[in-house]
Amino acid sequence: MSIDALPLTQDRTRELLAAIARVAVPILLALAVGGAILLILGKNPLTYYGYVVQRGLLSWGGFQETMTRMAPLLLIAAGLIVAFRAGIWNLGGDGQYLLAAVVTAALAPALIETLPRGLTLLICMIASVAVAAAWSLIPALLKARYGINEIITSLMMSFLGTSFANVLVKLFFRDPATTVPQTRSLEVVDRLPRIFGTNVHSGILIALAVVILVHLMMTRTAFGLRLQIVGANPAAAVHAGLKVGWLTVATFALSAGLIGLAGSVEILGVWGTVRADWNPAYGLLVVPLVFLARFNGIAVIGFALFFSVLMIGGESASRRIGVPQDFVLMLVGLLLVFLALVEYLDHLRRKRAGV
Amino acid sequence: MKMDSLPSPLQSGEMIDTQTMSTAISTGAGGNPAPVAAVRHIGKRFPGVVANDDISLDFNAGEIHVLLGENGAGKSTLIGILAGMQQPDAGDILIDGAKVRLGSPRESLDHGIGTVFQHVLLVPSLTVIENLMLGGSWWQKLARSAALARFRELSDLLGVTLDADALVGKLSLGEQQQVEIMRALWRGEKILILDEPTSMLTPQGVKDLGEVMRRLRSKGVALILITHKLAEAYELGDRISVLRLGRSVGAIAPDERRVMTEQQVTDRVIAMMFGAATPTDAAAAELLVGRAEGRRARREVDRSGAPRLRVTQIATAADRGACPLHDVTFDLWPGEVLGVAGIDGNGQKHLAEALAGQRKITSGTVCLDGADITAAAVPVRRQAGIRYVTDERLGEGTVGAFSVATNLLLKEIGSAPFWRRGMTDWTRIHDHAREKIQDHDIRTPSEKTPIGKLSGGNIQKVLLARELANDAGVVIFNKPTYGLDLQNTRLAHERIVESAGHGLGTIVISTDLDELLEVSDRIGVMYQGRLVGIVENGPEVELAIGKLMTGQVSS
């Protein structure tokens, strides 16, 4: 509870150091163990990490790719923060993301023929948000009405959503002019405008604005506080007379809507089309990132940057040094393990301190 | 809940069987030279607190050793150390004269030290014998026949008859506690620690527990009893030790105890607990145990006007085993305190929630000052002046991880002046909190401290500050003093009486009959979801209430 639970002044420095350690230690451990594995494979870990940083952060082209990648990650993170802070575990991100992407890819090329570019982009985003939000209604209503665990239902709906998105691409929105099943393409000139002549599309600006707005909503508004009460103690929410059912549905819709926006922005900014069987699976990738940031909308920006550098730099570094592309995923996995471990140790420390 | 027999008359003095008592004492506490267990110079610190400071106590076989003290006196810490849950920073624990280290609850149990905590820690969906076998090693097969043999042995020892195959969830709280005692003694019956064991029990359950304790004493078990109730300490205790601010401040040895009257014991204990050196202190201490003033003088409640709250034949739907309401009807006048007695689980919770607006009323009506509010939700009722001080202070009353300031406004979220057009004004919220903290003497390091870190008494002060603010008209208190120490209990009682004095209609739901007798004008009794009778408070009402509580025909 970032706004709420600051400890006494004399403990503040200690707590701040502990907070930094909680983040830095798992990352360093993951990098160290990842490095050890590289050594076993006969590769120089320093070279690998050097390539990662070089490509992901220091080269101009790579940095632009990193910025581009950050946009969907941040939007998904914003969606997850809303849900997680309200104690609602929306794990259906992939389905919501893909359905939104397909809706955008189907609408955009059709609309651009009659409508101006700005309006086309806006309508696509709104429609995608609405479809993703609607897709979350089933788990939301099941939870609000019958108390059915949303982890299961949202995950199931995610499988259905990804499959349904494929069906849509292959059966309804397929571009007859291509051999590989995919939707019609939105021309590059009609996509989201680039920033100052770079290759980075303006989706990153949308994402940054959204994540900051979400953070302010959670910490500075009555609505955000209500959501947090539902998340922290549902019984207290009932006791205080909050409409828990309505808040649950609203949270789900907001969360899925933001994840849908991520899908829409990615299509409007980068791809212009959805291919059958395309699934970047960002939804579950962002979950640990949001936990690392402790559901803090500002902190998550830094972690999204870190992840993006790792992903973009890692692709290139793997190719150059000759390890599989999935090595990055392994680093993420290690990060998760150490994150959990450090969290546990921190829990013990607090307990021993009698807090 | 099962209640086979009538509770004995509820006056505490009669709970004691003087004959068994005197014989037990003469056999039991006959001056054992070597204590079966002892602590020597125990010290334990937490950041900012000295929980235990140089405590030395002896625990003898066949003796009930009562530990008394206010909240924060260090009783829980000492018990935690003996139960192996905490390690002392200084001092030694001796078992049969030898130093031991109790590094875990397991080691503690292996030394024959068993602890029964205040709240039942059994698995309700398992049977009695399954619960008892839970402590076995994971690589071993469950040895049912051996367990049954041990179960019968302990049944004999305790003098109780329990069905080994009964589901624990179906047992009464008293019976569940017997299972807990068996589990505590499962691996050896040297020492039994009971942490406020009577707080959840019916009068009959209290009586049964007293029997079990005396029986164990006569079999040579060393018992340690933690309690807030001086009457219990007198009735059951052979040796009484008083802790205060982490130190052991005095004790009454068995030889002394035997020749003292209840009055003398109480006076000595009060002097030790509150350090009553001066007469004014002594008077304050008398007040704390509610003895000096006797029963509060009844106010005259004017029932000629219209009632403030009129509840007519309300019912609720069953929900997860909690007892629903049937056909509950009563009126509440301004300035009146209506006590609601009854054994826990007879619909009191539903009554409170239905009145507060948290629970749907399926039939019947609730009228406040003549206006029908049956369908109104919590915020509307709060606006209309209905307030609910819940018994689940951390469970639903507050959000433990949130600040005191936020919790003080938990039911006002979104309203002016703290929120404007949905935006939070944290400065105002914190200013408001500092004011309330000052006014209600809430002891907290700061208004930003998470409320979960405060003591029960201070959390209750936050709830009272929140619920009694701004034009309260009807206040429902659910177990207002549950888990509080004497000081905070007295404060809560004062607030109840004071608010009724200001013309509020007040409902006090409690399982503590003494409490209801002290604050109520009328006392209603809940039995199986019905309000089976309302009696005027006065002398000799205990028997009538006791009958109503157990479902005998209303008087």
Image (spheres, coloured by chain):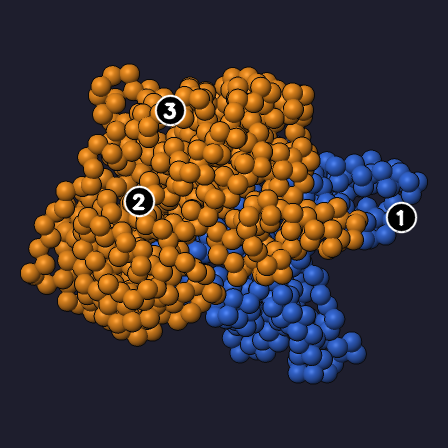
Chain colours: A blue, B orange
Quadrant assignment, res B429: top left
The residue under label 1 is A322
Q: Residue at x 57, y 50 (%)?
A: B179
Disc 1 to disc 2, C-alpha distance: 85 Å
Q: Residue at x 20, y 37 (%)?
A: B294
Report crowding for label 1: few under 14, some 14 to 19, many 20 or more residues within 10 A (C-alpha).
few
Disc 1 to disc 3, C-alpha distance: 90 Å
Report crowding for label 2: few under 14, some 14 to 19, many 20 or more residues within 10 A (C-alpha).
few
The residue under label 3 is B259
- The chain letter for the residue carrying disc 3 is B
Residue A60's spot in the image, x, y percent? Answer: 70, 45
The circle on residue B227 is none
Can marks 1 and 2 be said to lie on one chain? no
Work out whether residue A155 or residue B287 is closer to the camera in this orientation and state it: B287
| Three-letter residue code for mark 3 | Val
Give the position of the C terminus of chain B as an image quadrant: bottom left
Farthest residue toward the right?
A: A42
Q: Nearer the viewer, mark 1 or mark 3?
A: 3
